[in-house]
Image (cartoon, helix red, strand yellow):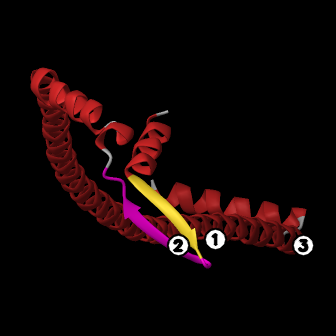
């Protein structure tokens, strides 16, 4: 609506005439026809009476804009602080993660070394136990074989003695021994 009024005012101030396909603009100098007096009165009333209103309105708008700018600056500064804190925390977290990773690698290496050392100890212990068991079994077998050899030798000796000592020889042997014993007394 404002645009329509302003175009009417402009058109009332300017008169266009078209002659021979050329446009010529000229200023309408008739004050009554152009409503110039009415416009000046309205303009004067707006400036004189509306000035405090518009000044207050513009001042309020200026304060609102300045407040929003201050809030934006504060928000920006807070965001920068939070970004700085977040970067600091990120750096700390990365450092902590790096330390944890290094500790985990050290623990894994230690476990690996300990595991290998323990495995070697276990293998050595098993070998020693196995060797001790083999030695014990060998001694047991050797002892058993000695007993069996001794038993077989005794049986053979007894059987040979039985063949050599027939009852007559046996009686003679006993008699001789008895005589030897009597002589010794």
The answer, for residue 111, to whether it is visible in the render is no
Q: Nearer the viewer, residue 106 or 131?
A: 106
Q: Residue 177 at what x, y percent from top left?
A: 63, 62
The answer, for residue 29, to whether it is visible in the render is yes
Q: Which residue shows up at 25% across the image and 56% down it?
A: 96
Left or right of residue 157: residue 101: left
Q: Earlier in the sequence, mark 2 or mark 3?
A: 2
Estimate how packed mark 3 is, as few (under 14), some (14 to 19) or many (20 or more) residues with alpha carbons within 10 Å.
few
Estimate how packed mark 2 is, as few (under 14), some (14 to 19) or many (20 or more) residues with alpha carbons within 10 Å.
few
Left or right of residue 79: residue 25: right
Q: Find the distance from the CA under tag 2 to the CA under tag 3.
A: 170 Å
The mark lying in front, picked from 2 and 1, is 2
Q: Which residue is mark 1?
A: 138
Q: Which residue shows up at 57% across the image and 73% down it?
A: 19
Q: Earlier in the sequence, mark 2 or mark 1?
A: 2
Q: Which residue shows up at 89% across the image and 67% down it?
A: 166
Q: Is residue 174 magenta?
A: no
Check if mark 1's residue and mark 3's residue have beta carbons within 8 Å.
Answer: no
Query: Magenta region, mostly helix, strand or loop?
Result: strand
Q: Quadrant of residue 21?
A: bottom right
Q: Earlier in the sequence, mark 1 or mark 3?
A: 1
Q: Secondary structure at mark 1?
A: helix
- Residue 72's disc number: none
- Residue 23's disc number: 2
Q: Find the distance from the CA under tag 1 to the CA under tag 3.
A: 37 Å
Q: Which residue is mark 3?
A: 163
Note whether 113 is above or below 42 in the view shown: below
Q: Residue 91 at what x, y percent from top left?
A: 22, 59
Residue bounds of the magenta highlight? 20-29
């Amino acid at each position: 609506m404002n645009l329509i009024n302003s175009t009417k005012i402009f058109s009332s101030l300017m008169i266009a005439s078209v002659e021979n396909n050329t446009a010529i603009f000229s200023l309408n100098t008739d004050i009554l026809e152009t409503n110039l007096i009415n416009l000046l009165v309205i303009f004067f009333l707006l400036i004189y009476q509306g000035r405090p209103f518009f000044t207050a309105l513009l001042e309020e708008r200026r304060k609102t804009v300045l407040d929003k700018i201050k809030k934006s600056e504060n928000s920006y500064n807070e965001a920068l602080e939070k970004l700085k804190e977040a970067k600091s925390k990120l750096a700390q977290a990365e450092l902590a993660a790096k330390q944890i990773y290094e500790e985990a690698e050290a623990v894994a290496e230690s476990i690996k070394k300990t595991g290998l050392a323990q495995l070697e100890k276990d293998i050595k212990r098993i070998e020693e136990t196995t060797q001790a068991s083999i030695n014990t079994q060998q001694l047991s077998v050797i002892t058993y074989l000695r007993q069996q050899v001794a038993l077989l030798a005794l049986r053979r000796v007894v059987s040979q003695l039985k063949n050599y000592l027939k009852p007559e020889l046996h009686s003679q042997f006993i008699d001789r021994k008895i005589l030897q014993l009597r002589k010794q007394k």
